[in-house]
Amino acid sequence: MATRARIGILQKDGSVLASYQHWDGYPGGLGYNLVENWTDTTKVTSAIKLGNASKWGIIIGTKVDFDDRNNPLHEVQNVYYTRDRGEKDQGPTTYFDELEYLTEGFNSGEEYIYLMKEVGEKNFLGNPQGTWFYAHHSDATGFKPVEEVAIKEHIESLQRYLKDKKERKVA
């Protein structure tokens, strides 16, 4: 079952550019991926401009056969409804501001919405990088930092995987 999400970036004029993402939208999945691999605001903007996606990987990538899950690129790149499947009307949405994004961003069944902002953080080279925030549909009162929640959920997921693997070996 899909955990739907929306990924947005705050623009200099205060608007939010965002697109839908279908799979693994929970903080330990998509949230962790965003924190780990999507801190460059230019890269994020370029990815969002390609529109709604089935999933986000670690790179934007190039056109692939949407349905060819055996293609190793499916594991590492974003897979888009327009670029990769040829669907129409799957472009990004622009919201007037953060408040409109918070109130309207859940309209396609999204469980989570993510927002990248520039808050003054820098990467290891001293270059500016974006910071990720999120909101859950059940508590859409504001955006909260996602990094710590995403890392904890991701670690818990890995621990469950190792436990299950160990139990399968014993059985």
Image (cartoon, rainbow, N blue to C red):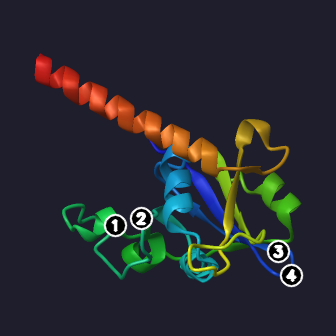
Check whether the beta carbons of the residues at disc 3 and disc 4 lie within 8 A of each other.
Answer: yes
Residue 47, percent from left and from top: 54, 77
Residue type, mark 2 in image: Gly
- Label 3 vs 1, first from the N-terminus: 3
Residue under the point 64% across and 48% down: 112
Residue underneath mark 2 = 57
Disc number placed over residue 76 in the picture, else none: 1
Residue underneath mark 4 = 13
Would you say 147 lies left or right of 163 here? right
Residue type, mark 4 in image: Asp
- Label 4 vs 2, first from the N-terminus: 4
- Label 3 vs 2, first from the N-terminus: 3
Check whether the beta carbons of the residues at disc 3 and disc 1 lie within 8 A of each other.
Answer: no
Residue 3 seen by the camera: no
Q: Which residue in the rendered view is the most extreme toward the top? A: 171
Query: Which one is in front, 24 or 128?
Result: 128
Q: Nearer the viewer, mark 3 or mark 1?
A: 1
Snapshot quadrant of residue 8: bottom right
Check whether the beta carbons of the residues at disc 4 and disc 2 lie within 8 A of each other.
Answer: no
Dot 1 surroundings within 10 Å: few (below 14), some, or many (20 or more)?
Answer: some
- Label 2 vs 1, first from the N-terminus: 2
Secondary structure beneath dot 1 equals: helix
Q: In what quadrant of the picture does the N terminus appear?
A: top left
Check whether the beta carbons of the residues at disc 2 and disc 1 lie within 8 A of each other.
Answer: yes
Secondary structure beneath dot 4 equals: loop
Secondary structure beneath dot 2 equals: loop
Disc number placed over residue 15 in the picture, else none: 3
Residue 57, percent from left and from top: 41, 65
- Label 4 vs 1, first from the N-terminus: 4
Residue under the point 86% across and 68% down: 97
Distance from the alpha carbon under mark 4 to that under mark 2: 28 Å
